[in-house]
Image (cartoon, rainbow, N blue to C red):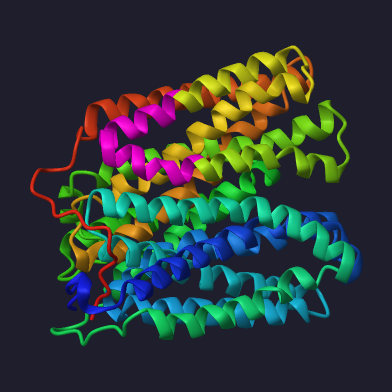
């Protein structure tokens, strides 16, 4: 598939509109992850969920989303990125409509699962359209800054919008609001993203690899999501874990022999992919997971009501958004390695300051210096780590590389929660236990710093053409 043409092939206004659409797509995915949280009590009352089944309103989305990202990325490379963007929006919109009109738990959970499938197509399509259409270097860094900043705002907007919509219109509004957004996304995709070009050569979906990889990843995400609740020695968890290991081992063997593999081993020759994926995985397990534990501190230690706990996140998200937007500028000037190191060191120091404040059961004001420094590091690192992972990847493999990156992001979140939740429940009191969680996360950040120093190149290879225009593929 021909992926690029001269940046003069379309008006600059269309270039900016395409970037706006891709950032909007990221916004929807981020928003839908958090918008459901505050509506869970209302959903339970209205549809008759039990306390044991209610958490599946969240898990039914996460499991297929995390398990299908790699396949979604490969589908982008094989069948066209605009096609998969449209398919993702369509699935997401239809599932949201079904969820908003669901009369009972069964249909709502099915709708959430289909939302997860739609997101698994949307995310790699969005990321790969950016990485193939922006030249490596400053152009891509700036585009990823916009994409990351808007996506980060979705987390804050989701928490606030979820509360307002549920309060004013009922729980179904958090799903129905996605329908016009998805329709707008489909229409905009046809208007501002050029059609996928005709693919030459034989299409090979790598059915065996796709089946083994998708089932293995889905079961692995299931184990990580459900293990802390059921117990790691529970029969269903052990069985699913064993099946995941066998399937993923089979996936590796298949990929080594396949003619056109789903995840080619040669792809890891790209200089930034392996260290980038490692950072994304560990970032999600540390930085990403701490947002979950902050809610416990706000409500269990500081005794904030739900609305006040939600507002407590707003300064953090504002810093994350600003620093995500600046991350591309910093990486463009100083290089990927230094951009990552600035973000990681800032975030790690912020975690330690937060842990110190929590150990003393400080109030919100006492937490703020550490939390703001942590948030600044989080925003900076988020942008630069995706730029790192896609550096040197051929255009025709950007879809699967984006799928691998987003898979690591989801796996990291599940791993972080699974490992840190038991730690948060120990210690002499909740404040000290949550302080220990932050110290542990800071140790993970130290490991990431070592990976970056060891594996990430100081700068991109010389001779890269840098342009600030998006190149719309034929």
Residue 233 appears in the picture as rendered: no
Q: Main secondary structure of the magenta part?
A: helix
Question: Which quadrant of the figure has residue 418?
Answer: top right
Tell me: residue 73, above or below residue 149: below
Of 63 and 384, nearer the camera is: 384
Of 45 and 185, nearer the camera is: 185
The picture places residue 361, in percent across and down from the top left corner, at 78, 16
| Residue at the right extreme of this rendering | 45
The total number of labels drawn is: 0
The picture places residue 113, in percent across and down from the top left corner, at 61, 70
Figure quadrant of the C terminus: bottom left
The picture places residue 460, in percent across and down from the top left corner, at 17, 42
Q: Which residues are magenta?
A: 323-345
The picture places residue 266, in percent across and down from the top left corner, at 15, 55
Q: Relative to residue 292, is residue 302 drawn left or right?
A: right
Residue drawn at x 34%, y 67% is 129
Asked if the magenta segment contains residue 327, the reply would be: yes
Residue drawn at x 64%, y 46% is 234
Residue drawn at x 32%, y 43% is 276
Residue 398 appears in the picture as rendered: yes
């Amino acid at each position: 598939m021909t992926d690029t043409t001269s940046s003069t092939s379309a008006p600059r206004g269309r270039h900016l509109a395409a970037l706006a659409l891709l950032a909007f797509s990221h916004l929807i995915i981020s928003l839908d992850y958090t918008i459901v949280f505050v509506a869970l009590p209302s959903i339970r009352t209205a549809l008759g969920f039990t306390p044991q089944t209610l958490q599946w309103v969240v898990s039914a989305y996460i499991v297929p989303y995390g398990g299908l990202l790699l396949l979604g990325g490969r589908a982008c490379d094989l069948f066209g990125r605009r096609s998969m963007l449209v398919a993702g929006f369509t699935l997401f919109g239809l599932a949201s409509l079904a969820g908003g009109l669901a009369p009972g738990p069964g249909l709502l959970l099915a709708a959430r699962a289909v939302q997860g499938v739609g997101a698994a197509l949307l995310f790699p399509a969005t990321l790969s359209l950016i990485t193939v259409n922006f030249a490596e270097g400053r152009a891509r860094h700036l585009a990823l800054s916009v994409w990351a900043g808007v996506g980060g705002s979705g987390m804050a907007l989701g928490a606030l919008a979820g509360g307002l919509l549920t309060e004013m219109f009922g729980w179904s509004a958090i799903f129905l609001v996605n329908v016009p957004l998805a329709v707008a996304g489909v229409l905009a995709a046809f208007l501002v993203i050029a059609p996928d070009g005709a693919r030459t050569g034989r299409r090979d979906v790598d059915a065996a690899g796709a089946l083994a990889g998708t089932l293995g990843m889905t079961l692995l995400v299931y184990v990580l999501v459900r293990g802390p609740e059921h117990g790691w020695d529970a029969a269903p968890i052990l069985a699913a874990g064993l099946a995941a290991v066998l399937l993923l081992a089979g996936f590796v063997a298949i990929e080594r022999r396949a003619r056109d593999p789903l995840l080619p081993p040669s792809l890891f020759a790209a200089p930034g992919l392996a260290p980038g994926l490692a950072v994304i995985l560990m970032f999600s397990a540390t930085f990403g997971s701490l947002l979950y534990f902050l809610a416990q501190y706000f409500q269990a230690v500081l005794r904030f009501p739900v609305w006040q706990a939600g507002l407590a996140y707003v300064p953090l998200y504002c810093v994350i958004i600003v620093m995500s937007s600046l991350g591309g500028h910093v990486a463009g000037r100083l290089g990927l390695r230094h951009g990552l190191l600035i973000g990681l060191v800032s975030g790690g120091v912020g975690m330690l300051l937060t842990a110190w404040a929590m150990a003393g059961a400080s109030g919100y004001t006492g937490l703020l210096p550490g939390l703001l420094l942590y948030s600044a590091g989080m925003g900076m690192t988020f942008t630069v780590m995706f730029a790192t992972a896609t550096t040197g990847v051929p255009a025709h493999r950007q879809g699967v590389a984006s799928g691998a990156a987003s898979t690591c992001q989801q796996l990291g979140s599940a791993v972080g929660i699974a490992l840190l939740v038991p730690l948060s429940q120990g210690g002499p009191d909740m404040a000290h236990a949550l302080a220990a969680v932050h110290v542990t996360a800071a140790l993970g950040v130290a490991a990431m710093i070592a990976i970056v120093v060891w594996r990430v190149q100081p700068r991109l290879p010389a001779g890269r053409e840098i342009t600030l225009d998006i190149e719309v593929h034929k």
